[in-house]
Image (spheres, grey):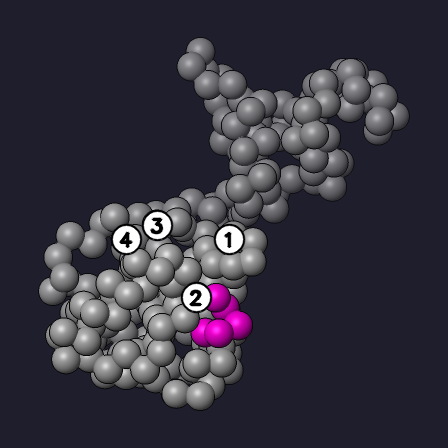
Amino acid sequence: MRIVIAEDAVLLREGLRMLLTSRGQEVVAAVGDGDALRAAVAEHRPDIAVVDVRMPPAHTDEGLRAAIQLRRDHPEVGVLVFSQYIETRYAAQLLAGGAQGVGYLLKERVADVKDFLAALDRIAAGQTVLDPEVVTQIMGASRRTQALGTLTPREREVLALMAEGRSNSAIAEALFLSYGSVEKHVTQIFTKLGLSPSDNDHRRVLAVLHYLQA
């Protein structure tokens, strides 16, 4: 199997190279950023690319966005996202275009080298390999997005101002509404997002988290 590794941590990158080479795989390139990954895949046309999520320059989601582009430009190349982070937005995009030959595993949850190598084989064969925690978080993000879609435009405006830390009085002033109207909108937001009254949870904070995460 011909493999490209994209990992910005030098020790982990070289460790993966040595591990895969010792198990009879051919690592045709090992790079440290998204641009180098795209260039390596275009040059070597590997069977699979192993990609970290966070890489230079900003160390946010560059690797995952590069993986999405690889799936679009080189659909014949399998992609394994191998990271300690779950980025639900781009993970959903990676899977949306057809999940054949795609995987997303969390570094800390791979306990056996044989399992990792088996995952590579399955992805190269066109199968899908996903950590259950990745599936759970993607589904949760999808439900949050669907719930937000039930909000009216005015309710979304109110929630956006809540996310800025505005009080109900400040929201009323910003939107030229009465205080009572804002209270009603906030109550509707809680209801539509499934946030029941609780002594343990702050519904306003949870509503804002739904907004930001989706």
Q: Where is residue 115 in the image (x, y as percent from the top left)?
A: 15, 62
Between marks 2 and 4, how big is the CA–CA gap? 17 Å
Please name which of the two marks, 2 or 1, marks the residue nearer to the observer.
2
Q: What element carries label 1?
A: loop
Q: Mark 4 points at which residue?
A: 107
Mark sitting earlier along the chain (4/1): 1
Task: Note whether residue 20 is visible.
Answer: yes
Mark sitting earlier along the chain (2/4): 2
Q: Name the residue under label 3.
A: 84
Is residue 36 found inside the magenta-colored segment of the image? yes
Classify 47 as above or below 59: below
Q: Nearer the viewer, residue 5 or 97?
A: 5
- Which residue occupies 24% across, 63% down? 15
Q: What is the magenta range?
A: 33-37
Q: Please give the label number shown on residue 32.
A: 2
Classify 36 as above or below 172: below
Dot 4 and dot 3 residues touching (CB under 8 Å): yes
Dot 3 and dot 2 residues touching (CB under 8 Å): no
Between marks 4 and 1, how big is the CA–CA gap? 17 Å
